[in-house]
């Protein structure tokens, strides 16, 4: 039987880690140090025995529903997400405000291309209407709520007519969607658009934040990039503290899962630090 997500104290956010083989080994040896592990649906789909090997609760995270695009996931994919969500007893299903498949531009539109990467959508009226409709249609397939993660922005997506924060604010005002606020993505977007990260945080509908991601950020040729293989910069921790002064997210996930050079002591120290920040 899978471990259950405890109700816990309503004033205490749970703190977990994004899954990797190294982190799987850590929680197998010392499960009481971490409240949960966030596991990609795509990883569980490929290795169903993984869920049974993890001795702590699981939160399911997806990259397969292409909420920000115009190509719907297959019925088989939706059925499998629902089955695994029930199997691992996830409290919600995290998904990206992005697309992972699209119609090819240079043909008659019948060929679908899978990007193998989550791509930030266009922030326009047309895209907003489509996302609202897509989200509502997807949510009907699940008893558990879907929460959407803000994408990192590296440039203005062609055709966009509004900011990401306006897009998200209008999306949450017209649906019951919760947010997965990735603070590294917020920081990346702010720095690439030469904005204050703290001022940008004020523009997000933070009352709808359910889960938070914390991860690293790298800089190449003046552009800030998402990087789960390095430590989060100090401004991301400052954003985390500021967020908890404004809102009460239920969970904080540390995404240090791209490389294995983080020592277990360093990971546990980051968990301790985040627990102090959000207490």
Image (cartoon, grey):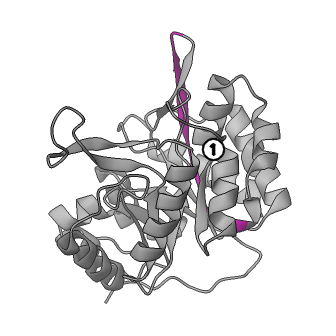
Main secondary structure type of the part rendered in magenta? strand
Place residue 55 in its image quadrant.
Answer: bottom left
Residue 131 location in percent, x, y? Answer: 49, 60
Above-or-below relation of 21 to 123: below
Residue 233 visible (yes or no): no
**Residue nearer the viewer, 105 or 265:** 105
Above-or-below relation of 117 to 212: above
- Give the secondary structure at mark 1: helix
**Residue nearer the viewer, 166 or 212:** 166
Q: Residue furthest right?
A: 245
Residue 178 visible (yes or no): yes
- In this rendering, position of residue 41 left or right of residue 265: left
Place residue 76 in its image quadrant.
Answer: bottom left
**Residue at coordinates 71% horizontally, 42% vertically from top-left?**
237
Q: Total number of numbered labels?
A: 1
**Residue nearer the viewer, 187 or 123:** 123
Image quarter in which the C terminus is found: bottom right
Examine the structure image and report whether residue 218 is included in the region drawn in magenta: yes
Residue 81 location in percent, x, y? Answer: 29, 73
- In this rendering, position of residue 39 left or right of residue 177: left
- In this rendering, position of residue 161 left or right of residue 44: right
**Residue at coordinates 62% horizontally, 24% vertically from top-left?**
192
Image quarter in which the N terminus is found: bottom left
Q: Which residue is mark 1?
A: 164
Q: For the magenta stretch, what is the residue range?
A: 208-221
Q: Residue furthest front?
A: 108
**Residue nearer the viewer, 131 or 25:** 131
**Residue at coordinates 47% horizontally, 59% vertically from top-left?**
130
Above-or-below relation of 226 to 88: above
Residue 16 location in percent, x, y? Answer: 52, 62
**Residue at coordinates 25% horizontally, 59% vertically from top-left?**
43
Above-or-below relation of 14 to 7: above
């Amino acid at each position: 039987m899978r471990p259950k997500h405890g109700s816990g104290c309503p004033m205490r956010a749970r703190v977990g880690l994004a899954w990797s083989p190294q982190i799987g080994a850590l929680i197998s040896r010392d499960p009481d140090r971490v409240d949960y592990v966030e596991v990609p649906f795509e990883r569980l789909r490929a290795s169903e025995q993984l869920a049974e090997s993890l001795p702590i609760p699981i939160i399911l995270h997806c990259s397969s529903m292409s909420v920000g695009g115009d190509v719907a996931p297959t019925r088989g994919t939706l059925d499998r997400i629902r089955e695994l969500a029930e199997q691992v007893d996830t409290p919600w299903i995290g998904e990206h405000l992005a697309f992972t498949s699209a119609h090819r531009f240079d043909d008659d539109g019948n060929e679908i291309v899978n990007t193998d990467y989550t791509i930030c959508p266009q922030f326009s009226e047309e895209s907003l209407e489509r996302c609202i409709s897509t989200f509502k249609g997807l949510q009907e397939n699940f008893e558990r709520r879907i929460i959407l993660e803000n994408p990192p922005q590296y440039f203005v997506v062609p055709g966009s007519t509004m900011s990401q924060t306006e897009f998200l604010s209008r999306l949450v005002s017209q649906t019951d969607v919760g947010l997965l606020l990735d603070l590294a993505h917020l920081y990346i977007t702010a720095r690439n658009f030469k904005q204050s990260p703290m001022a940008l945080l004020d523009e997000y509908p933070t009352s709808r934040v359910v889960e938070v991601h914390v991860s690293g950020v790298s800089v190449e040729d003046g552009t800030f990039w998402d990087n789960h293989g390095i430590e989060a910069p100090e401004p991301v921790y400052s954003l985390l503290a500021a967020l908890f002064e404004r809102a009460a997210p239920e969970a904080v996930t540390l995404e240090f899962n791209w490389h294995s050079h983080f020592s277990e002591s360093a990971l546990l120290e980051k968990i301790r630090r985040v627990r102090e920040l959000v207490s």
